Image: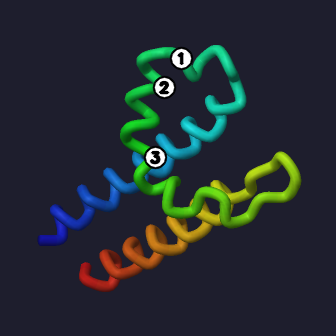
Amino acid sequence: MIIVLQALYYILQVYFYLMVAYVILSWVPDIRQTRFYYYLHLIVDPYMRLFRGILVVGQFDFTPIVGFMLYMFGLQAFGAFIVSLA
């Protein structure tokens, strides 16, 4: 059971890094038309779409920061739960 939870924890960590790459690559206009970015968009957008447009100041959308913070709080809580089981 603990091995499955640890594997899930590592998968969720990889997903976080995919989200970071998605946001950083979104600043490069030419890369948005590549196949890599398309698949990255398919993977990451379902979570990021939950927060889109919540915190917009002028032309800047600070929503990914909110999404990252909530995701990391959840990931840390999940990691603490796994440690408490061991």
In the picture of the structure, the residue carrying the numbered disc 3 is 45
SS for dot 3: helix
Residue at image position (45%, 36%) is: 41
- Horizontal side, residue 25 vs residue 83: left or right: right
Residue 37 is labelled as 2
Q: Looking at the picture, which amino acid does disc 2 mark? A: Tyr
Q: Dots 2 and 1: beta carbons under 8 Å?
A: yes
Mark in the foreground, 2 or 1: 1
Q: Quadrant of residue 4?
A: bottom left
Q: Quadrant of residue 54?
A: bottom right
C-alpha gap between disc 2 and disc 1: 7 Å
Which residue occupies the foreground of this view, 31 or 73? 31
Q: Dots 3 and 2: beta carbons under 8 Å?
A: no
SS for dot 2: helix
Badge 2, how many Cα within 10 Å: few under 14, some, many 20+? some
Residue 33 is labelled as 1
Residue 19 is labelled as none
